[in-house]
Amino acid sequence: MTTLGVRRALGRADRRIGAETETAVRHADEGGASERILRVLYLAVGIGGLVYSAVGLGKTLTQLPLLTPWFGWGGWIFTSGCPLILAALALWAPLRVMRWIGSIYGIVFLLLLVLWPTQQISVGLPHLDSPWTNDILTVPAIAVAISWRTRPLWVYVILSAALSGYVRAMSDPAVGARLAALDATYNLLMNCTFAALVVVTRQSAARQDAAAVAARLETSREAEASARVQQRVRIDALVHDHVLSALLIASRPAPASRDALRALAASTLDTLRDESPLGAEPLTDDDFVSRLRSSVTSQSDGIRFVTQLDGAGTVPADIAQALLEAAAEAVRNTLRHAKPRDGAAGVLRTVTVSADPQGVEIGVADDGQGFNSRRIPPERLGVRVSILSRMETIDGGFAAIESSRGVGTAVTIGWRAGAERPAA
């Protein structure tokens, strides 16, 4: 590896660390505490809404004939159907979709409260009962508490409670302002209690996610800093042992012969370019493939292994080591994270390796669910440090990750020589 290549890699690492601090919290791991808690809350409010609808069904059926048909039946179907949809989608639908459903549920419910007095065709309700909408008022309030930010949520809680008192007063002239105010106060206390519980739960989950992200980010930064220190130590050693020695000999009053200095300078440049931290002999293509196959099968016997060798070349020891480690990490990632697509019995994983006189390329692919490869969190050490950063610091190394939801994931790593490799 040349000195220039090392210093470029160190510069890229320095710039990445500044960006990681700003973006880490925005890229929480899939399945984090916040996501799990939100899905459980949506499932709970869905089940609770169905229970409320079932318990109040008798009162609802008594009051529906006293309302215009489109409003009474349409409103009841909507308020009963939204919890059913939330419960059905809670464990698998995107959270953005769940938030939209919860928001629509809450806003349309407010509209029902506003329109109730204009759609009631009777003078009053039997036995001075409260409207059936007041009995289910807490359910859309909880849905809004899960879906909205804190400040708009409290506006909604107060507004919905006030509207419940308004509907109670307008539903029957005999109710009176005092009873309507008591109804509104009771609904306000209920809404505030459940909304506060949801807010506290969400905040606790968010703090847990933030702490986890901060811990992983700190580990990532320490790993990158350690890598930079190791590279700088190696550069300093090379400069001290070779460059300064050559300059010192050249600066002596009685320098060596011109030919000797030229040979020493050439040897120093060769050392800077080709110094291998392992100090081992290059591997032949066959030896390299054998070691890669052993690394893959040691992790799982169910991975398909495909080879394509074109000629007989060699791979420098330090490059071979980096390729083997990056490939092993890619295999670990697919074994750990790849999940079967809907309807599939399992995940098909394939490792392909091709070698020709110009270099080596390794592919690790699966047909799992995939992920958004454009939003890899900076704290994901396996991807960023063990695969991408490792290959970036190799002269001629490259790495790419291609994935999308429902398609699968393909990791490509390799090394291309600057010139044709020598035969084994």
Image (cartoon, helix red, strand yellow):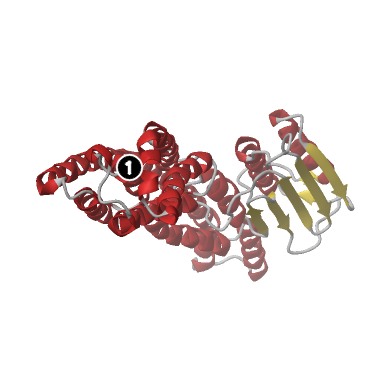
Q: Which residue is drawn at the image coordinates 32% and 45% (left, top)?
A: 133
The location of residue 232, given as percent across then percent down, is 47, 53
Please state which amino acid type lies under the numbered disc 1.
Answer: Trp
Give left or right: position of 418 versus 53.
right
Mark count: 1
Give left or right: position of 125 versus 406.
left
Residue nearest the observer in this picture, 296 or 10: 296
Q: Which residue is drawn at the image coordinates 68% and 60% (left, top)?
A: 396
Residue at the spot of label 1: 132
Q: Which residue is drawn at the image coordinates 40% and 39% (left, top)?
A: 61
Q: Is residue 334 visible?
A: yes
Pick out the residue farthest to the bottom: 258
Quadrant location of the N terminus in the rendered image: bottom right
Residue nearest the observer in this picture, 134 or 316: 134
Pick out the residue farthest to the right: 311
Q: Which residue is drawn at the image coordinates 70% and 46% (left, top)?
A: 320
Residue nearest the observer in this picture, 402 or 322: 402
Quarter location, residue 52: top left
The secondary structure type at the circle numbered 1 is helix
The location of residue 308, given as percent across then percent down, is 86, 48
The location of residue 344, given as percent across then percent down, is 73, 38
Pick out the residue farthest to the front: 123
On screen, 278 above or below 411? above
The location of residue 49, given as percent across then percent down, is 40, 38
